[in-house]
């Protein structure tokens, strides 16, 4: 499984809003979410690439994420420059 930078994802879940439709689990490309009974749970937060598919497909806004290229681009630029990744979620820039 692809891993990103630990503790930087903006993915948030308000479990009380979840109606168990399973749309988020169907569209998440990295298996970050799974159903726990009739509600979704986040099982691997650090695998989230912040694509936003889960939040865009949630009919009750139980999931939120600042979608975009965020940490993925930070990792690529850090690798190319030979530096530590820096992204907006840690107050830096990725330009």
Image: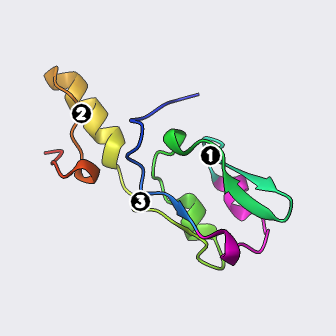
Please state, as top left, top right, bottom left or bottom right, where the C terminus lies in the image.
Answer: top left
Residue marked by disc 3: 67
Magenta segment, which residues? 14-27
- Residue plotted at (86% across, 59% down): 37
Check the image and report above or below for 32 versus 84: below
Q: Measure how far apart labels 3 and 2 are at the Cα level.
A: 18 Å
Which residue is rendered at x = 24% and y = 45% of the image?
87
81 lies left or right of 56: left
Front residue of 75/5: it is 5
Colour scheme in the image?
Answer: rainbow
Magenta stretch holds residue 26? yes
Residue 28: image location, x then y, percent: 62, 50
Q: Position of residue 52 (x, y in %)?
A: 49, 60
**Residue 71 has which mark?**
none
- Pick whichever of labels 3 and 1 is earlier in the sequence: 1
Q: Earlier in the sequence, mark 1 or mark 2?
A: 1
**Residue at the spot of label 2:** 85
**In the picture provided, is 49 more to the left or to the right than 29?**
left
Work out whether 94 lies above or below 14: above
Residue at the disc numbered 1: 32
Residue sitting farthest toward the top: 82
Total marks shown come to 3
Q: Secondary structure at mark 1?
A: loop
């Amino acid at each position: 499984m692809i891993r990103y930078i630990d503790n930087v994802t903006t993915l948030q879940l308000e479990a009380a809003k979840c109606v168990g439709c399973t749309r988020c689990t169907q569209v998440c490309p990295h298996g970050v979410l799974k159903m726990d009974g009739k509600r979704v749970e986040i099982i691997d937060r650090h695998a989230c690439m912040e694509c936003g598919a889960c939040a865009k497909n949630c009919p009750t806004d139980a999931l939120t994420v600042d979608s975009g290229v965020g940490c993925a681009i930070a990792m690529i630029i850090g690798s190319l420059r030979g530096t530590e990744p820096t992204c907006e979620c840690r107050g830096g820039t990725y330009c």
